[in-house]
Amino acid sequence: MKVQDAIKMIAGSLVFIGSLLTLLVNKYWVFLPMFVGLNLFQYSLTGFCPLEIILKKCGMKD
């Protein structure tokens, strides 16, 4: 799996889990998908993604 694919999979999972937790547990979980969406937006503008750095340090290939 490539880094870009892993970023999309992790971001999608976090948005889904955060939305589900918002509905089932507490309304403040909405900040998780909001943070992920904001991070994806700034990544599209700047090309900087902290998750990409972490995944590369863990040994995932480009």
Image: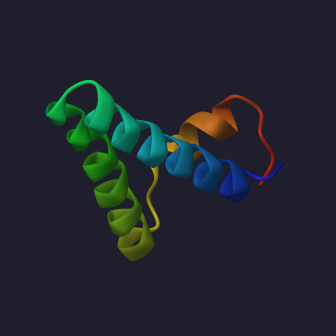
Q: Nearer the viewer, residue 21 or 53?
A: 21
Q: As drawn, which residue projects farthest toward the front?
A: 24
Q: Residue at x 15, y 33 (%)?
A: 28
What percent of the width, then of the height, locates residue 2?
79, 53
Q: Residue at x 26, y 51 (%)?
A: 34
Q: Nearer the viewer, residue 25 or 32?
A: 25
User: Number of marks in the image?
Assistant: 0
What percent of the width, then of the height, locates residue 14?
47, 41
Q: Quadrant of residue 32?
A: top left
Left or right of 35 on screen, residue 56:
right
Q: Residue at x 67, y 58 (%)?
A: 4
What percent of the width, then of the height, locates residue 13?
54, 43
Q: Name the image quarter holding the C terminus.
A: bottom right
Left or right of 59 on screen, residue 12:
left
Q: As drawn, which residue projects farthest toward the bottom?
A: 45
Is residue 29 among what the camera can see?
A: yes
What colour scheme governs how the chains and residues are painted in the rendered image of this protein? Answer: rainbow
Is residue 50 among what the camera can see?
A: no
Q: Residue at x 35, y 44 (%)?
A: 19
What percent of the width, then of the height, locates residue 26?
20, 27
Left or right of 4 on screen, residue 24:
left
Q: As drawn, which residue projects farthest toward the top?
A: 25
Q: Nearer the viewer, residue 37 or 30?
A: 30
Image: 19 above or below 59: below
Q: Quadrant of residue 20?
A: top left
